[in-house]
Image: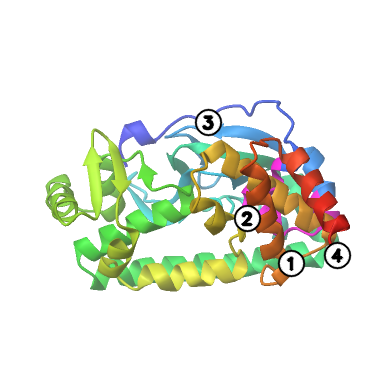
Amino acid sequence: MTAALIGRRQESPDAVFPFEAGGRNRLLGLLPQEEFSQLAPHLREISLEQGRVLQEPGETVDYVYFPHGGMISILAVMSEGETVETMTIGREGAVGLTSGLGSQTALNRATVQLPGSAAQASAARWAELAQQSQKVRDLILQYKDVQLAQVLHAIACNALHDVEARLCRRLLEARYRVGSDTLPVTQEFLAEMLNVRRTTVTLVARMLQSAGFIHYRRGVLHIRDVMALEGAACDCYRVVRGLTDRVAPPAPIYPLSQKQAFGPDLIAAMRAAFEDILRGLQLSDRDDPLTAMIAKKIIEIAQTGERDPQRIRERVLQSMSTAP
């Protein structure tokens, strides 16, 4: 990795994590009401600046990071200082999660590759919660299995698939983790991610742009045709995403909100209201028809101009209580 991507650790700000924003990270959104209520006072909202190092191999795991956006690379660090990316983590996962099972020493480096934000909790508090809750321990083990699958597929993918298919896969993974079709990436970053020369990335990116799959200019890549990109990607993306969605399923509110002309801030507010409502109603089954009804009602309220998650929540619950 380049020096530009190896940042220094920074002290966490003291801003208290807002309860209503808990649903932005999927794993936090899956915590039962009681467990989340115990964790919420100990969460802090932090910025994930590109290049920031969250943990180093051999060091004590002090914090657990639950990203709301952005993408974090997990890197194996060789004795000579060289690094190899083994997996990526976004809003579907967390860094340091296994500290809840007693793993107190980091085995790898975690570096922010695409900027965003996260909820941060002390590893000690997370471990205490996991010791008290079988549901939390089960969630950690399920996500750990997904991470192992991601590593194994990455190894096979790098050995068996061509650069074009791998680049399409990595762009789709970044889109999936960030939650946006616009990615702030450089060709240097893509080359390091694929472990190929920059000239190779330039050639493949031009081919994808000529085909109308992407548009790339000055460090910003926009995915123009998601379906075409998925068709050109290797099957590893679909397999790993399927496993991830099984453990941390996306909220119904997200695909519905993407069909409307909503900005990212409003989408975040709608997701926060959605997760808060589900916790209050103790709805953990994302396939329950009631969740889709709640998502549609939130969309309707947002279209009236309401932007506050708490007010959206109140109006949805009020409409449900008065429904025949």
Where does the image place residue 140, in percent across and percent down from the top left?
67, 63
Tell me which numbered mark, 4 or 2, is placed earlier along the sequence: 2
Residue denoted by label 4: 324
Rendered image coloring scheme: rainbow
Q: Is residue 35 magenta?
A: yes
Q: Which residue position is annotated with label 2? A: 26
Label 1 amino acid? Answer: Leu
Judged from the image, the secondary structure of the residue bearing numbered disc 3 is loop
Distance between mark 4 and mark 2 Cα atoms: 32 Å
Q: Earlier in the sequence, mark 1 or mark 4?
A: 1
Residue at left offset 43%, top offset 47%: 180
Task: Name which of mark 3 and mark 2 comes first in the sequence.
Answer: 3
Secondary structure type for disc 2: helix
State the residue at coordinates (24%, 65%): 165
Q: Residues within 10 Å of mark 2 (few under 14, many from 20)?
A: many
Q: CA distance from mark 3 to mark 4?
A: 55 Å
Circle nearer the viewer, 3 or 2: 2
Q: Based on the displayed image, in which of its 4 quarters is residue 253 positioned?
A: bottom right
Report which residue position mark 1 lands on. Answer: 290
Task: Please state, as top left, top right, bottom left or bottom right, where the C terminus lies in the image.
Answer: bottom right
In the picture as drawn, the residue positioned furthest to the front comes out as 324
Q: Residues within 10 Å of mark 1 (few under 14, many from 20)?
A: few
Magenta span of residues? 21-36
Q: CA distance from mark 1 to mark 4?
A: 15 Å
Which secondary structure class fits the magenta region best? helix
Left or right of 119? Residue 4 is left
Q: Residues within 10 Å of mark 4 (few under 14, many from 20)?
A: few
Vertical comparison of 238 with 97: above or below? below
As measured in the structure, the alpha-carbon distance from the residue carrying label 1 to the one carrying label 2 is 19 Å
Closest to the camera, between mark 1 and mark 2, is 1
Left or right: 160, with 21 as reference point:
left
Where residue 76 appears, as percent x and y from the top left, is 41, 53
